[in-house]
Structure formats: structure tokens, C-alpha cells
Image (cartoon, rainbow, N blue to C red):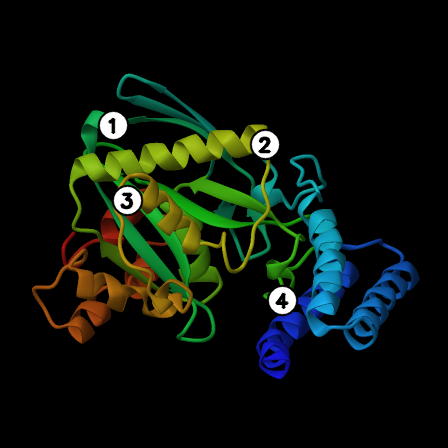
Amino acid sequence: MRFLMGLLLSPLVLGSALWAVAAIWIDGPESRALAGGLGVAFAAATVTVLLVVRPFVRGALAYAVLFAVVSGWWLSIPPSNDRDWEPSVARTPTATLDGDLLTVHNVRNFDYRSETEFDEVWETRRYDLSKLTGVGLFLSYWSSPLIAHTIMSWTFEEGPPLAISIETRKESGEEYSAVLGFFRQFELYYVMADERDLVRLRTNYRGEDVYLYPLDVTVATARRLLLDYVARINELAREPSWYNAATHNCTTTIRHHAMAIGANGPWDYRFLANGHLDELAYEQGVVNTSVPFDELRRRSSVVEAANRADDDPSFSLRIREGLPGS
């Protein structure tokens, strides 16, 4: 029994100990010597209690206390809205609702000359929710077909869509790292923007493959989803939160919003391997299913249309021409 218990606990202990050492090194003191020393001390204490304290269960409990101390410290690290941010995330968006009139402050509408050269334009825009027509999902691929960046965009009878991208809020000179994304290195940020900013940046300047899928949901559902986003955006303006590559990323956070409005669905691995999120949406019937999936995917690419439209004020209309389900 002791051997079996030790065998079962060993992977859990090893995995959690490695995470704790990494957390101390990545999120711990700025002094590399001090962070390294604390990591070594934790590792040494872990080995000691597991090898010396008997029976094994008592040693495991002693380790649990050590791990709880590190976890408690890590969870207490405060996020902030007050840092030297990159220009693209420098302003915190907020929104107010008066009847059907949604007023959004700090809508990003940058005018790009290249990926890194642009004129900063932040706007206050008003959206009439009585004119809301639906919501669509953008998938943007920059490397592996397994992983994409997701953007939600709400459309209206009059005026441009409101696109919202859930991202990391990077400081000046900071670069995103998939590994660091699992720790407390980046605050969570919602970019509220014009599609000529969010989408054109990816298609025309970063060379990413971008697809747009209008979602087959009711206008009432699209409205509830947008207002749940707005509530979270206003909350983040008051109390910042951490981004996490597993639990609060560009896709899992969308699922949190969907669940909040009652659009519950079973968990699926494609919420993490989100490059296949369109396949999941097709299987669930929330995108156009009148054509085979491979044809839908081919026809949903907006890259060519976006490059032709470029900075045309009708950018959003032009990328939707001939789009299945638009």
C-alpha cells in the first residue's frame, strides 16, 4: 500500500515541485542570485522531507505545507494597471450603457504603416444595440496550425463592427513568451478596436492567415455576450487581473463569457488546441454548415480581401463579401 501510494503521489509531487521552482525563478525576486537561492532551498527542502520524514504519507504532508507556502505567495502577487505599457495597450478601455446606447472609451483605431510604425488613434465610439445584427469569430494563425489567436467582432446595421481581442498587456520592450504566459508576467487586456486595426494588422502587416466565421446565434445571445464582455472590461479597469496561457487566454476566456450567459457546452481539447476551434464550431452547428467544412474554411479566409481593402473605410464590408453566412 505504501509503495502504491508513493507511486501515485510521485508524479504529482514532481510536477508541482518543478512548477514551484519555476514560479520562484520567474515571478520571484528580481535578484537572480536570490531567486536562484530560494529555488534551490525549496528543492532541497522537498528532497529532505520526502527522503527523511517517515512514513511517506507524513513526508508528503510536510511537502504539501511547503508547496502551500509557495502557492500562497504566488497567488498574492498583485497585478497592476499602472506600468510603462506598450503604445498598443497603453489605454484602459471602459464602456457605459444607457438604454440601447453603448458608449465605449479608448477604442483603438491605429493607422499602420508597418507592424511597428503607426499613428496612435484612440476614439470614443457609440454603438446602438438595437441595431446589433450578430457576432463573428476571427481565427488568426501565425505559426502552428494547432494554435490561433481568436477575436470576437459584433456587427451593426449602421456603423463599423466592434472587435474585441483578449490579449496580454505587455510593458514597453516586453515580448510574449508561451512559457512565461503560464506565470504572473502579463496582465490580462481586452483590446476594443476597429477591425481595420485588429484584423488588418494581422493580414496586411504580420502576414498571418485569418479566417472569419459569422456565428449562427440569435441577436439576443450576441447582445448578452457583448454586455458580459463589457462588464468584465469595466471590472478590469477597476481591478486588474493576470493573463494565464491555460486558464485565461484568448479562447478559454471566451468560453468563460459564453458560460456566464448560459451558452454552456462540454469541454473539448480544441479550446486549448484552438487552431481547430472552427472544426468544433462546425460540429456544434454554430457556424454555416450548408457547405462541407473544408469548403467553408477555404471560403472564410479574409486575407486576400483584407489586402485589397487595406485602409478603405469600408474594410469590414469588403472582407465579408461572399463570406459564407455573412
Residue 120 location (% of width, % of height): 56, 40
Is residue 80 among what the camera can see? yes
Which numbered disc, 3 or 4, marks the residue closer to the eye?
A: 4
Which numbered disc, 1 or 4, marks the residue closer to the eye?
A: 4
Residues 271 and 96: in front is 271
Q: For mark 1, what is the residue?
A: 129
Amino acid type of the residue tagged 1 in the rendering: Leu
Nearer the N terminus, badge 3 or badge 4?
4
Residues 206 and 4: in front is 4
Which numbered disc, 2 or 1, marks the residue closer to the eye?
A: 2
Question: Alpha-carbon distance for marks 3 and 4?
Answer: 39 Å
Q: Is residue 242 left or right of residue 69?
A: left
Residue neighbourhood size for the residue with mark 1, other residues' Cα within 10 Å, grouped as few (<14), some (14–19), many (≥20):
many
Is residue 172 among what the camera can see? no
- On the image, which quarter does residue 100 sit in? top left
Q: In this view, does 298 lie to the left or right of 311?
A: left
Question: Alpha-carbon distance for marks 3 and 1?
Answer: 21 Å
Q: For mark 2, what is the residue?
A: 239
Amino acid type of the residue tagged 4 in the rendering: Val
Nearer the N terminus, badge 2 or badge 1?
1
